């Protein structure tokens, strides 16, 4: 059972990093207190993980035939990759790190199944694109409807307050549903945990990261998104959540960070505002290559040296 | 905090908008009294303008504290506060002008034109109140803001006439000349601040759409 600890560590770092994508704006603008933000995120994330988390477990577990100790090293490699890339401010995706690690271990044991990789890579590429289009359409449609129906400044203020709260809760739910497979999905594939127990342990570990170590990232990300007006921020989080939910139904864990970046670009397109620079897009591109490769190389080295 | 805002059905927001409306209504009243005082050369009425400025100060403090107690989205709070501060600058300019006119009696040759400027200031304040109420309802402000700008342009033109007329007024000392200059500058500056306030209303209106 101790082999699950590296997965818990990975979940903790995912929770500490990705919760900022949910309530970062609400917290940085003072609309939601930090304590409220982290508790709402933790609770809804747990609900999402338990109710829909098992849907993505299969994809992660079926990429290679891993032993329990391989799974331990894969999760450890994923966690170290995430931490290292975060230090270099490259938007790292936990799903890319863990998929890379699983394939690295699979190459070593000659059990890697690359036939399923195209579906996963396609989902990675389509995550920001999907969020971009969703955000663009939502901004156009919701903006039109709200401008026609809710004109009072007071009512609009209340609508945005409630909207940020509700989309945040939905965002947390989809984060748990989609990303819990990254954390404990490999343990299901090697038979250490059942899908339901893996979802519960993964959800708890992500929630632990949210509750204990998310303030700093939340402040950084939140202040980076603050230049968006409240409606655009609300739309960006909703588009991110809808994209994550869509990929959860497809059964592929994807990156919430890349989804929110795509959504922010989509919102910027409506107002012809440059919300993300080319430098930022280049960093995402580097992350797409660096994250799975680093995860794979680390897992390969760990398993080769330690076992 | 956020739940309290949702379940209070905008109680704090209503409180703030009512207070800001009261603030602008006081400004309208002060401008009207100032105009009457100038027209009738009534010192008691001028003192009333000073009293209204003090009352408005208390309202401004209430508005700002209510805003930071959680009314409206944090995003527009600084802009609302800035608007209230600009309206307060109008009060300050009006109070200073009232003091100048208490200290120095306006020459009869300039009284009619100065009263017309004061009347336009009053009309601008009324239009500012209408614009604020329209903004709260989420209506378009362009025509109302345009009206304020037209008034301001008219006052600018009248300022030139006033200054030309002032050149004909016999001045016996430097200080008398300075007081006359200060009085006319103050009188025509009020409209600049009202225009600034209306521009800021437009910024708030656009930023919440």
Image: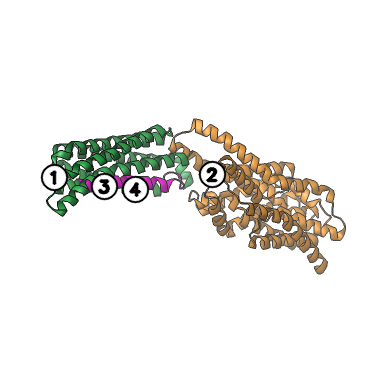
Chain colours: A orange, B green
Q: Is residue B140 magenta?
A: no
Task: State how far apart marks 4 and 2 are (Cα).
Answer: 29 Å
Of marks 3 and 4, the one in the foreground: 3
Seen as rendered, the residue at the extreme bottom is A305
Q: Earlier in the sequence, mark 3 or mark 1?
A: 3
**Label pair 3/4, CB-CB below 8 angstroms:** no
Q: Give the class, few, some or many, for how many residues have Cα within 10 Å of label 2's Cα (few <14, many ≥20).
A: many
Residue B152 as seen in the image, left or right of residue A64: left
Residue B61 visible at all: yes
Of marks 1 and 4, the one in the foreground: 1
Q: Is residue B96 magenta?
A: yes
Of marks 4 and 2, the one in the foreground: 4
Badge 1 is on which residue?
Answer: B105
Q: Is residue A12 above or below residue B204?
A: below
Residue B201 as seen in the image, left or right of residue A273: left
Q: Chain of mark 2?
A: A
Q: Is residue B108 above or below residue A76?
A: above
Q: Main secondary structure of the magenta part?
A: helix
Task: State how far apart marks 1 and 4 are (Cα).
Answer: 30 Å
Badge 3 is on which residue?
Answer: B93
Q: Is residue A171 above or below residue A202?
A: above
Seen as rendered, the residue at the extreme top is A148
* Numbered range of the magenta stretch: B72-97
Q: Chain of mark 4?
A: B
**Label pair 1/4, CB-CB below 8 angstroms:** no
Q: Earlier in the sequence, mark 1 or mark 4?
A: 4
Residue A164's tag is: 2
């Amino acid at each position: 059972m101790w082999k699950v600890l590296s997965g818990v560590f990975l979940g903790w770092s995912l929770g500490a990093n990705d919760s900022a994508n949910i309530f970062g704006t609400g917290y940085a603008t003072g609309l939601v207190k930090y304590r409220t933000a982290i508790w709402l995120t933790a609770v809804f994330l747990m609900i999402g993980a338990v109710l829909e988390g098992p849907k993505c477990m299969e994809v992660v577990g079926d990429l290679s035939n891993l032993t329990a100790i391989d799974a331990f090293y894969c999760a450890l490699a994923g966690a170290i990759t995430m931490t290292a890339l975060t230090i270099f401010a490259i938007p790292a995706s936990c799903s890319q790190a863990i998929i890379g690690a699983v394939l690295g271990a699979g190459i070593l044991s000659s059990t890697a199944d690359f036939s399923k990789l195209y579906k996963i890579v396609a989902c990675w590429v389509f995550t920001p694109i999907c969020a971009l289009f969703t955000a663009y359409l939502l901004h156009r449609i919701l903006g039109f409807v709200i401008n026609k129906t809710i004109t009072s400044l007071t009512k609009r203020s209340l609508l945005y307050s409630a909207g940020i709260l509700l989309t945040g809760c939905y965002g947390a739910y989809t984060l748990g549903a989609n990303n819990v497979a990254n954390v404990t999905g490999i343990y299901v594939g090697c038979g250490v945990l059942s899908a339901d127990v893996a979802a519960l342990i993964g959800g708890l570990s992500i929630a632990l990261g949210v509750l204990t170590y998310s303030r700093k990232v939340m402040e950084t990300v939140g202040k980076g998104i603050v230049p968006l007006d409240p409606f655009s921020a609300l739309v960006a989080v909703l588009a991110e959540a809808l994209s994550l939910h869509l990929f959860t139904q497809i059964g592929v864990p994807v990156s919430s960070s890349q989804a929110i970046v795509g959504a922010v670009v989509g919102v910027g397109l409506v107002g012809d505002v440059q919300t993300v620079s080319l430098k930022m897009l280049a960093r995402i591109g580097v992350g797409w290559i660096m994250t799975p490769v680093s995860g794979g190389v680390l897992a390969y080295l760990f398993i080769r040296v330690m076992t | 905090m956020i739940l309290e805002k949702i379940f209070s059905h905008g109680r704090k927001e209503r409180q703030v908008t009512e207070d800001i409306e009261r603030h602008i209504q006081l400004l309208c009243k002060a401008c009207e009294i100032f105009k009457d005082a100038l027209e009738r050369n009534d010192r008691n009425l001028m003192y009333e303008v000073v009293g209204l400025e003090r009352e408005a100060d208390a309202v401004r403090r209430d508005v700002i504290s209510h805003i930071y107690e959680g009314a409206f989205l944090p995003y527009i709070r600084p802009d609302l506060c800035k608007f209230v501060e600009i309206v307060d600058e109008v009060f300050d300019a009006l109070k200073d002008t009232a003091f100048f006119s208490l200290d120095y009696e306006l020459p009869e040759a300039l009284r009619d034109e100065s009263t017309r400027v004061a009347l336009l200031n009053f009309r601008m304040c009324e239009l500012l109140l209408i614009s604020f109420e329209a903004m709260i309802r989420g209506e378009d402000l362009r025509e109302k803001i345009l009206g304020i700008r037209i008034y301001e342009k008219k006052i600018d033109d009248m300022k030139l006439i006033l200054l030309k007329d002032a050149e004909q007024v016999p001045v016996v000392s430097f200080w008398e000349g300075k007081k006359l200059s200060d009085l006319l500058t103050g009188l025509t500056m009020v409209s600049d601040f009202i225009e600034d306030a209306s521009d800021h209303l437009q910024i708030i209106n656009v930023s919440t759409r």
